[in-house]
Amino acid sequence: MAMMAIPECLQGPEQLSVTGPKVIFSFELFGTTVNFTETVILEWIVMAIILGGCAFLTHNLKVRGVSKRQAIAEMAVEAITNLVRDTMGKRWLWFTPYIASIFCFSIFGSLISLLGFRAVTSDFSVLLTWAAMTFALITWTKLKFGGVGGYLKGFADPIPVMLPINILSEISTPTAMALRHFGNIAGGSIIMGLIYFGLTSLSHMIGMQGAWLSIGIPAVLSLYFDLFSDFMQAFIFVMLTMVFISNAGPQEDADGA
Amino acid sequence: MDMSEAIVLCGSAIGAGLAMIAGIGPGIGEGYAVGKACEAIARQPEASGAVTRTMFVGCAVAESTGIYGLIIALLLIFLKPFT
């Protein structure tokens, strides 16, 4: 029997390498090198997907005779509004668009790895940017409700000796948020890479011509590492954002107004 | 591969393994949190939504030490900062 030629794409990975995002081009700006990585391009793709989805779901809205498309859009908006209302309270409802955009960006940015790209959220700078936005919002909320004096006084709370610890906890909030999301997504993708590599080696070891073992079997694990973990991390990121921001303001009245 | 590089690689691998001991803490903590959440839901099934949400956020916060360990281990194995 003639040996069938195995196409290149079925050979599986030859070796495992873990690198940062590919740099497309870099340029000099004020003495530092600015790298234009593939993450930026993928972010623009994700943004286009989200914008396109929103435009598709919300064009031609009606009060009566609601179409299926509009029902989906209403369901999504209502779900996220309820989440914000339950977590932050009624007076923070105007935060919903920010929370919804971070949530969508996180989910689609992670799920783009299912199409074979590098996940946007496995680049630490993306998460650090989001965490920095949350940090800015927390600081802004504290300044708005407590004034500059109250903000500075909050660092010496309850006793001035706590000053270094308070500063440390202020900095560690966004860092921990960013690291948690990044660690989960990047760790998951590395584990998936190891599994593909291991199954390829195994199928070569038992005498197969192509990497047949790595077809289908990793999908089960991908359910956890790609789908579940992505949704979970997006949810946790927005939950923590909401909790930290609403905790920075004064506590709500008992009637929830 | 000369001797010094081999020693560094060996140390990195051992260090990565040691760093993942950090996984014990979040494991115990999250198990405890989920167990308590189950008890709370059994006692008050109508509050299951709020309990589950709070539990997930708590788990995520408890998980961060394990994630730090994972990041250190990945750095040691794949980026090899000391070679």
Image (cartoon, helix red, strand yellow):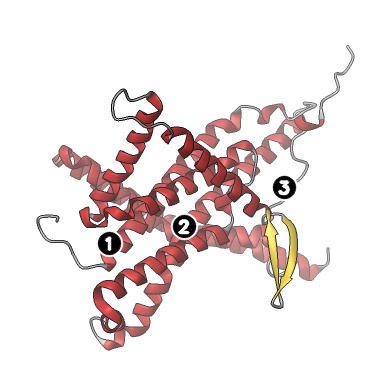
- The residue where tag 2 is placed is A180
* Labels in figure, total: 3
Question: Is A32 rendered above or below residue A243?
Answer: below
Task: Please rate how many residues cluster around mark 1, counting C-alpha atoms within 10 Å: few if below 14, some from 14 to 19, many from 20.
Answer: many
The residue sitting at the top extreme is A1
Say which of A1 and A176 sits in front.
A176
Task: Please rate how many residues cluster around mark 2, counting C-alpha atoms within 10 Å: few if below 14, some from 14 to 19, many from 20.
Answer: many
Give residue A35's mark.
none
First in residue order: circle 1 vs circle 2: 2
Q: Are marks 1 and 3 in contact (CB under 8 Å)?
A: no
Q: Judge from the rendering whether residue A207 lies leftward or rightward of residue A42; answer left or right.
A: right
Q: Judge from the rendering whether residue B10 lies leftward or rightward of residue A99; answer left or right.
A: right
Question: Is A61 rendered above or below residue A48?
Answer: above
Query: For the point 63% across and 62% down, which residue is it?
Result: B76
First in residue order: circle 1 vs circle 3: 3
Say which of A46 and B21 sits in front.
A46
Label 1 or label 3, whichever lies nearer to me, is 1
The amino acid beneath tag 3 is Leu
The residue sitting at the bottom extreme is A160
Label 2 or label 3, whichever lies nearer to me, is 2
- The residue where tag 1 is placed is A246
Q: Are marks 1 and 2 in contact (CB under 8 Å)?
A: no
- The residue where tag 3 is placed is A16
